[in-house]
Each structure stands twice: as C-alpha cells, then as structure tokens.
Image (cartoon, rainbow, N blue to C red):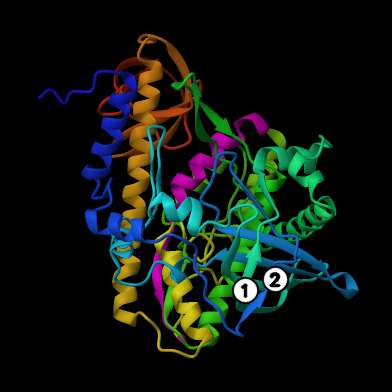
Amino acid sequence: MNTTPTSPASTLMHAARQAMLDNGLLPDFDQAALEQANAIVQPAKDSGAEIRDLRNLLWASIDNDTSRDLDQLTVAQALSGGSVRILVAIADVDAIVKIGSPIDMHAHANTTSVYTPAAIFSMLPEKLSTDLTSLGEDQERLSIVIEMTIDSQGGVGQSDLYRARVLNRAKLAYNSVGMWLQSGAAAPDRVTAVTGMDVQLRTQDRVAQLLRAARRARGALDLETIETQPTFSAGVLSDLQPQETNRAKQLIEEFMVAANGVTAQFLSGKGISALRRVLRTPQRWDRIVALAKELGEALPATPSAPALNAFLSKRRQTAPALYPDLSLSIIKLLGAGEYVLDVPGQPVEGHFGLAVSDYTHSTAPNRRFPDLITQRLAKAALTNQAAPYSASQLQELAAHCTLQEQNAAKVERSVNKSAAALLLSSRIGAKFDAVVTGASEKGTWVRISGPTTEGRVVKGFKGLDVGDRVQVVLQHTDVARGFIDFARVE
C-alpha cells in the first residue's frame, strides 16, 4: 500500500503528524479517550449555593476570528472613586474532565494544543474544547470567576475567586474590535446588536490601558513580534500573513496577566503549593547590551527590565519599521518561560518580561494543561478540600509541561517552515533581506518576510549573531522536513 502523500495538502499534513511524533506529542486520541468523549452529551450542570448566577451580566469573548475554543469572558462594573471591578470568567473544564480520566491522560501527555497550518491538534477533544467546555456565544456555562478591583492608577486592589454560571452575550474577534477601539472604524455587528456592549467594551479598554501603563512603569517589556496566520484560497494554502497587535489584544492580555497574578496570590494565601510561570533574569544580558550599543544606546552591565524597556520604547519611536525584528532578537536572548513549583513561604522568581512577581497560568484550561491543574487547585481551595496534587507531583508536572511546551513550539515552527517551504519552492535563487534570529553551535537562523518565516543559513554564517541584518539567497527547500536553506550574500 502506497502511503506517500500525493498532494501539497497531504504532504503538509503528513509533515505535521510526523513532527508531533518526532517531538514526543500524540497526534491522535486513543480509543478510551474517544469513547469517553462520545459518552459526554451535555455541558456540566453542577449546582449548589456556592455557584453564583451571573448570567445577567454583559459577558463577551474576544479571540481570533476563527477560534472556537473560548476559554474566557470579561465584563466591567464601574465603582465609586474612579475604580472599576473587572470580572474574568474562565471555562470550568474540570467540571467535565476529571483527574485520571482517559481525556485527562491525553491532556497530561501533550499539555497543550498545537496550532499548525495543516491542522490543530487539540489538547482536548474538539467536542469539548470547541463546544461543551467552551464559553460559546449564547451558551450557559460553568466558570471560575476571577474578580479584581482596578483603581484609577491601574493598581490591582481587592480580589476574589469563586464559581459562577455565565452566559456569553457576544463572540467577538480581535481584528474588528481592535479597529473599532483604536481607529474609529464602525463597531462590529455583535457589539451593536447587544444593548450596552459598546459602553462595556470602551470601559474595559480604558481599564486595560491603565493596567498596561502601570506595568510599563514597572519595567514590563513592550515587545512586538510578528506572528503569522495561514491564509487559504479555495482550500489551498496561499500565504502566511503577519498578525499585528491591537487594542483588543492588549485588552485581553492585560486582563489575563492581572487575573493570573490574582490566582497565584489566592493559592499562595491559602497555603497551597502550585505552579508558577516564570521568566528568569536573562543569561545573555551581555549580548543584549552589545546589541543596544550597536544601535547607539547604553544599557547597564547588570540586567534591568526598566532600562531595557526604556531602550525598547526609544527604538520603537526612532525605527518603528525595524522594531519587530529587534523585539524578536530580544525575545531570543531573554530565553523561554518555564513552569516551576511554588511552595508557600519559599521564594520563587517572577516574570522578568511582564514585570510581575506573582504569576501563574490559569486562564486557558481548554488549551493548556497547567491552567487545568491550577483550576483544580483553586476549586479545592474554595471548598477547603485537600489539594489534588502533591508538591512532588507538581514538581514533576512543572518540568513535564515546560518540556512539552517547548516540543509543541518546535512542532509549530517545523510545520510553519513546511508551509513556508511549500510557498517558497518555486523561488529558488531569490534574494531576501533578513535578520538573524538564532546563532549557536547548532546553526544560524534568519527570518525573512513574504512569506514571514525562518530558515537556516548553510553558507556564509560565520561571524553572524542574533540581531544582525543580512541579505540571503534561497538555495533549497524541503516541504516534508520543513527545511529552508539560505546562503549569505557577501
């Protein structure tokens, strides 16, 4: 039987599945998980006095245009003195996916959904993540609500966590809401269709910008990378389009950062060991200093987030077109975030890039296993029950989730490269302006645009380092293996 892919689409899918397997991830659910999913026919219906009824509030989701795995809803309530109460509702995935069940074991194995141009490899069966555990529009769902009061200076004050029943009034998209918030474009149809939603979102936007300003004042890094999204024409991959940030994305980002901080503090206050998300002080600070010096700026010899952010802000103003490339270089040099065990009373590092000391992952339990773990710990704390994970189990889970997150990123990069290789296969010999994004004993890598992708420099790479700008010529592509090879133009 011939199993060789016979079309570009099947070649790309084969490459995606192989990348999953090569990186220790499961591309398919096993029979037990499928049978469990088939047996689940309705969303969770837990009841009790501890579950508040908040279905009357103007909840809305904001996500990517095509997203159906909706993890969070937000709503704002104005208070006296200029403060605003922000409520973030998180899908109660644990109400259906129990510890040790077949679906939970698959989620434990992969720890994250993997998004590629060929397919989405969901952490949970799509029957759950895009329906029964998703906070879909006009669907009544159980949630964990993170409530926090934001003052007129962007400070997070009183906070609380509790279970609640919620109802999504409007499924909104980043791009259309962002254009409306920041450029005066017409409000999206779903905003105008729900009475009061326009005022509600304007209030949320104002509070998010206060939170953003407060974090920037503390040294949070204002980085702007170029992420791509596949574009299809008549079902055929036609481009990898860069996705830009906007006010709607900032709104969700700020509320999620604040909500994750509140959740970390809540668990610590309950004396419960948990997972923290940290970004350690960068080890390659010397290269960041050298990169700034090449651009005529000075940074201190020891790592300083406020100093780095001041440098970045200046560069954004003076060279906005080059800022995404600079941001990518800085991100590469900062290193990757990781999960660590947080034992109450013991010191734990914060997040260097976000400029927060208390931070976990709790706001995306349909997509990330650490968030489901955190949700289970929070629910146990709310009912004064024993924690469902021991400290030693959490220690192992932290390492495993960090590793699988890295493996998932490798898959996404690999399949994006396969997609880009497919798009570039007819352009051998073409020249591109590029920026060096990686330089080590393992190889030297550059990013080009049109399509936006990374490739390896196989000739002329000596002396190149992260952040250098070079011209390269395309020499070879391999769709199946995701290889894109360049030579440096001297």
449 horizontally vs 487: left or right:
right
Q: Within 10 angstroms of label 1, few (less than 14), some, or many (20 or more) residues?
A: many
In the rendered image, which residue does mark 1 sit on?
164
The first of marks 1 and 2 along the sequence is 2
Whether residues under marks 1 and 2 lie with C-beta atoms below 8 angstroms apart, the answer is yes
Q: Magenta region: which residues? A: 320-345
Q: Look at label 1 and name its amino acid.
A: Ala
- Residue 298 drawn in magenta: no
Q: Residue at x 51, y 51 (%)?
A: 69
Identify residue for label 2.
54
Q: Amino acid at mark 2?
A: Leu
Quadrant, the N terminus: top left
Q: Please indicate whether residue 96 sits to the left or right of residue 190 in the image.
A: left
- The percent coordinates of residue 403 (x first, y second) are 31, 57
Q: Quadrant of the C terminus?
A: top left
Q: At numbered mark 2, what does the secondary structure look like: helix, strand or loop?
A: loop
Q: Secondary structure at mark 1?
A: strand
* Foreground residue among 299 and 63: 63
The residue located at (56%, 43%) in the rendering is 292
The residue furthest bottom is 384
Above/below status of 13 relative to 42: above
